[in-house]
Image (spheres, helix red, strand yellow):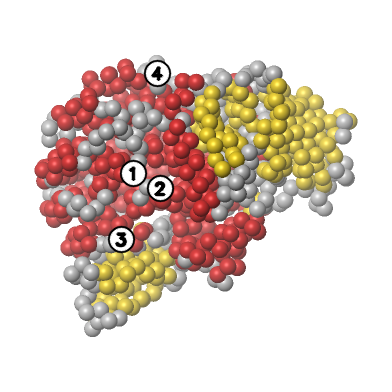
Amino acid sequence: MKDDAKQTIYLKDYKPFAYVVEDVHLTFALHPTATRVVSRIQFAPTETADGVMFLHGEDLTLISAAIDGEPASYRKVSGGIEVDVPDGPFTWQAEVEISPSTNTALEGLYMSSGMYCTQCEAEGFRKITYYPDRPDVMAPFTVRIESDMPVLLSNGNPQASGDGWAEWHDPWPKPAYLFALVAGELVNHAGQFTTMSGKDVELNIWVRPADINKCEFGMGALIRSMKWDEEVYGREYDLDVFNIVAVDDFNMGAMENKGLNIFNSSCVLASPETSTDANFERIEAIIAHEYFHNWTGNRITCRDWFQLCLKEGLTVFRDQTFTGDMRSHAVKRIDDVITLRARQFREDQGPLAHPVRPESFVEINNFYTVTVYEKGAEVIGMLKRLVGDAAYKKALNLYFDRHDGDAATIEDWLKVFEDVTGRDLSQFKLWYSQAGTPHLHVTDSYDNGTYSLTLRQSHKPSPNQTDKQPMVIPVAVGLLSPNGDEVVPTQVLELTEVEQTFTFDGLASKPIPSILRDFSAPVVLHQDQSDADREFLLANDTDPFNKWESGRMLARDTLLDMIENDAAPNANYLAALDRALNDETTDPAFRALLLALPTIDDLSQEIASKGGTPDPTAIYDARRALRGAIARHCGDTLTSLYKTHQVTGAYVPDAETGGKRALTNAALSLISLLDNGDTARTQYAAADNMTQELAALSALIQIGAAETELADFADRWKDDRLVMDKWFSLQTALCEPQDAAKIADTLTKHPDFDWKNPNRFRSLFGGLISNTAGFHAADGSAYILLTDWLIKLDAANPQTAARVSSAFDTWTRYDEGRKLIIKTQLDRILATEGISPDMAEMVGRMAK
Ligand code: 0A1
Ligand code: ZN
């Protein structure tokens, strides 16, 4: 390991910092290989101070250090420096040198396409200067930037500027992880917002000149977010300016630095010609997410990194609600649950499972996970459902009043709900500490007008957690009579014990239950449901989630029957799907979702959770056979939907026309199985927006008939890196499984495969990993290829390499042959000289 000093950190060991930081002044003299950073920091000791202060620092060349103007007495220790300090308040002044242009890890200050930028969450500020780099140390910052770059930005409000320099002041105390600096040859798309109390805010999206035409949508999304946060949460923006900057090299999606959000360019730049409907929706959601952090994350931050879900779960919950409000709640909920099951349930089922609030870590960057983010958001949704909308609103207002300016904890968060509602949330808190997805088993009976529902919960062991306690599970239930009327509207049953029975009286006949409406808890539901009941709910349920879920369960079970018993596709399912597709009362986007079959990975998760051994090739074949059967059985419907739902006129990235495109393109993908790609080829040639172009190209790749179009696409888009990312990922994602590793390997030799760019690396390898049957090819070729590249990337960018390595987290599901090859790869990574602590932790957890 590069840094054998990295040790496990435990939540239970939390201790406050013994010094208060009263003021921070930083001066940056920017230079690609020799940037000088002068820090002048006012410290004051607290009661626990003992005369020795520890400051974090990594990869810094210390030029000088002084206390109150005198040379400081210090010792370099692992991860930083120990300084002898006075008993009273003092000023620390230090000068360090750093090299942004050689910083390929993209943490701290680095360069991307000729511009300087920073990424400090979680622990990157320590690569900029010596500092108590922990979220509970908050201070106002003043920053002076000296550089001949024309645009110089930092947090807060601009204070003064001149030729070759600019000063920024951020009056809001913040932890160092929210620090940001940008310097570059940038241009801005400007906007303006007047807040609810009448203050004018200047808005800017800063980009490289070639991207200036891709900012308008992002600006609109920002303004919608600012308005929404005022209207729905009563939160007003608190600085004179709000800046967003797009950078090409970025490890994650975006970052909520105070007043200066930095975005992966893929998460902010958009235009109809280059971005799909899905891109537009994602960009709107991420802009909202980062903006919402201004209150949930920045004004109220986290006491320590164990509390990450405090800001992330809540902010994801807020951005999900926002997207629902802007577009469709039903479609958004279904999309979110598809992702939750595909990614978070998967994580929860494997060796990387951890609680929403983990209890220990080696490298915190490895815990920016779907569990912390998406399950963290589900926990907030459950809390809101349990206390009701009015109490949720009151609790949030209390949270903002009580904790503004604090570095808070999950205990603080739950306490506001307890104080507002008088409820004891100690059992609810298990959602934060118990890993794994609970299982909910439902049985029912009907006797003489009374319907009984028995709910039982069970829990499988997780790493380091064997004995689990029963949790509070909100189960939203509605009952329908056999004629389709809803006889009991949605009620939330609270399951708090291992098993409980709930009764409903006065029912004329046995109802058809609709259970876990709106997916009211992140659990695996086990329910003996007949095909007839599912068909009935698919046609009649008033809850859009369960309406969709009924179709999903029919599809899943027919696939499992095909895989496990060599059965033919279920004719009842095909007929019910055809009827549902023809139901013009439902949203086209909803019908598009009905056509999205469970993925190979979803099915392999299902098979593994029942104790079976999934065979990716067999699952691939069954899926392909079912798609063929749907195409044939629903052919007329699909052709007619394709024609009648075409969108005409100029492209608008809204939910309504996007839903129509989603439906026609889902139809197109199936139609292509029957017409040799003729319709797709026509659509490709006529397309005037990326959604239509890419859908046609995808359909052609899937039938192995895209050679001409792939060449044409690369030729037309070679100068647009974000579009070329799509070109790389589509090929590895959608090709025939047996070709996947070979195609991926060939693409790595393409002159545009810039592997140090995280977007490009993730496009190629993320595509390969998502091609489940290809990634799990029995000869191990894809495992070996990915491992070679992970080892190579780890040396340059440990954070991204470690994240991508989680592709192996399902390895114990598979047969002995595949397991042996994967285990050999994991061991090969661990045995690599100089492997990063990030990678060592991830692979170590998986290889256990
Ligand atoms: N806080 C950001 C995500 C983020 C996390 C870590 C990063 O670098 C290690 C970058 C961004 C968010 O939730 O959007
Ligand atoms: Zn976030």
Gap in Å between the C-alphas at discs 2 and 1? 8 Å
124 and 43: which is toward the camera: 43
At horizontal 38% and vertical 44% (from top left) the residue drawn is 810
The residues tagged by marks 2 and 4 sit, at their Cα atoms, a distance apart of 33 Å
Location of residue 705 with respect to 664 vertically, above or below:
above
Q: Residue at x 26, y 50 (%)?
A: 587
Image mark for residue 326: 2
Amino acid on which disc 1 is placed:
Ala
Q: Which residue is mark 1?
A: 655
**Which circle's residue, 3 or 1, is located before the other in the chain?**
3
Q: Position of residue 692 (x, y in %)?
A: 27, 32
Real-space Cα separation, disc 3 to disc 4, in angstroms = 46 Å
- Distance CA(mark 3)–CA(mark 1): 20 Å
Q: Earlier in the sequence, mark 1 or mark 4?
A: 1
Residue type, label 4: Asp
Examine the rendered structure and indicate whether residue 536 appears above or below residue 112: below
**Image depth: mark 1 or mark 4 in front:** 1
In the rendered structure, which disc, 2 or 1, sits on the residue that comes first in sequence? Answer: 2
- Secondary structure of the residue carrying tag 4 is loop
Which of pointers 2 and 4 indicates the residue nearer the eye?
Answer: 2
Q: Name the residue beneath numbered marker 3.
A: 543
Residue 719 visible in the snapshot: yes
Local packing at callout 2 (Cα closer than 10 Å; few below 14, some 14-19, many 20+) is some
Question: Residue 585, percent across and down?
Answer: 22, 54
Is 667 situated left or right of 811 in this image? left
Is residue 480 shown left or right of residue 250?
left
**Alpha-carbon distance for marks 2 and 3?**
20 Å
